[in-house]
Image: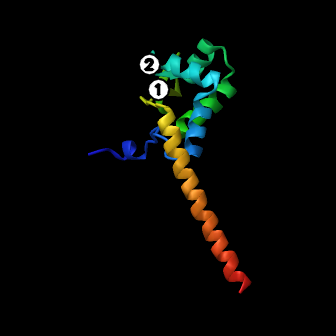
Amino acid sequence: MASDEQKDEVRFKEPETLEELSDALSLLGNLTRLRVIAALLDGPMFVQELSSKLAVSYPLLHLHLKNMEKHGLVRSEYAIGTDKSKRYIKRYFQLVDFKLEVTPELIRRLASASEQESGAKAKKRAGQTRVKKR
């Protein structure tokens, strides 16, 4: 049985609409985020480590990581450490295994579903318009 933490975890999922596919491609179409993914393949890292390794400012990197975590590409945990008798808490990030396969067939299937949904909405609006005219 999955723990509460595992149930709440967001997972990167296969797009079910053209909009979701566009969002996923936008998320993965950023050079900094792709570099983060490549770096995290070596294992979990603290934001400061990633910032140094990638030569990206801490605030900018934190924004990217927050967005990536929101969409299920990475997950974070807090670790307590000590340094010269001081305790500190650091947040480290790790990559979530994902796969996105974009094929012409996937795009056609999502586009077809989108067109059918748009057609149904248009018919519904047209039906509502006619009712109002009576």
Q: Quick check: 40 left or right of 51?
A: left
Q: Which image quarter: residue 64?
A: top right
At x 46% / y 26%, what residue is drawn?
95
Mark 1 residue element: strand
CB-based contact (under 8 Å), mark 1 and mark 2: yes
Eyeballing the image, is 11 above or below 36? below
Which quadrant is the C terminus positioned in? bottom right
Instruction: Looking at this view, name the residue that lies furthest to the left.
Output: 1
Residue 86: x and y, percent?
53, 22
How many circles with numbers are drawn on the protein? 2
Q: Local crowd at mark 1 within 10 Å, few (<14), some, or many (≥20)?
A: many
Of 17 and 121, nearer the camera is 121
Q: How is the image coloured?
A: rainbow
Q: Position of residue 130 (x, y in %)?
A: 68, 79
Helix, strand or loop at mark 2? loop
Dot 1 or dot 2, earlier in sequence: 2
- Name which residue type carries label 1: Gln
- The numbered disc on residue 15 is none
- Return the x and y of residue 106 as percentages of the image width and height: 48, 38
Residue 31 in sight here: yes
Q: Closest to the observer: 100 or 98?
A: 100
Instruction: Say which residue label 1 marks.
Output: 94
In the depicted structure, whether residue 44 falls above or below residue 108: above
Amino acid type shown at disc 2: Gly
Q: Which mark is residue 43?
A: 2
The structure residue drawn at horizontal position 52% and vertical position 45%, both measured from the top left corner, is 110
Q: How far apart in space, not on screen, are marks 1 and 2 (Cα)?
A: 6 Å
Give the quadrant of residue 128. Answer: bottom right
Q: Looking at the picture, how far across and down is residue 7, in whole percent?
A: 38, 46
Give whichever of 133, 91 is nearer the camera.
Answer: 133
